[in-house]
Image: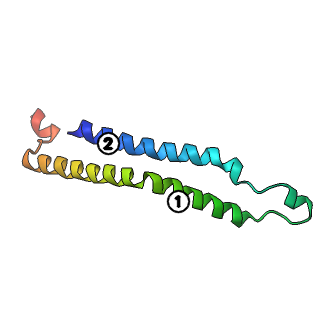
Amino acid sequence: MEEARRQIQRQLDMIERQITRRMTALIPQLQPRRRAYRRGKPPDPSAFLERYRSNLAAIRAERQPEIDALSRKLARKDRAIAAFRQRHPVPDRQEAAS
């Protein structure tokens, strides 16, 4: 049961890494065009953040159903593990040694 929980957590972590990797690959495309700065108009840093956030939201929206399903599955596993531990308590190591 705990191994299944770890596997689900690994899947969620993998999705997060994939999203991070895609956003890292997109950063050069999100940078402002350099020609505007040569004309005396400095690049707007908030525009970069806005583009970054909108792309991140779009990528997350693509994967959101998968993330939600895995999160629900993980919560079910956590509840099952907690219920099992409550039904079958493990004695403390000190008590078992005496």
Q: Residue furthest top?
A: 97
First along the sequence among labels 2 and 1: 2
- Secondary element type, mark 2: helix
Quadrant location, the C terminus: top left
In the rendered view, does 15 fall on the left or right side of 34?
left
Numbered label attached to residue 8: 2
Looking at the picture, which amino acid does disc 2 mark?
A: Ile
Q: Residue placed at 31% from the left, 39% from the top?
A: 6
User: Which tag is nearer the camera, tag 2 or tag 1?
Assistant: 1
Q: Position of residue 77 (x, y in %)?
A: 22, 47
Quadrant of res 10: top left
Q: Residue placed at 76% from the left, 65% from the top?
A: 44
Q: Residue placed at 87% from the left, 56% from the top?
A: 35
- Secondary element type, mark 1: helix
Q: How far apart are labels 2 and 1 at the CA level?
A: 23 Å
CA neighbours of label 2 inside 10 A, class few (<14), some (14 to 19), many (20+): some
Looking at the picture, which amino acid does disc 1 mark?
A: Ala
Mark 1 sits on what residue?
Answer: 57
CA neighbours of label 1 inside 10 A, class few (<14), some (14 to 19), many (20+): few
Q: Residue placed at 50% from the left, 43% from the top?
A: 18
Front residue of 1 and 63: 63
Quadrant location, the N terminus: top left
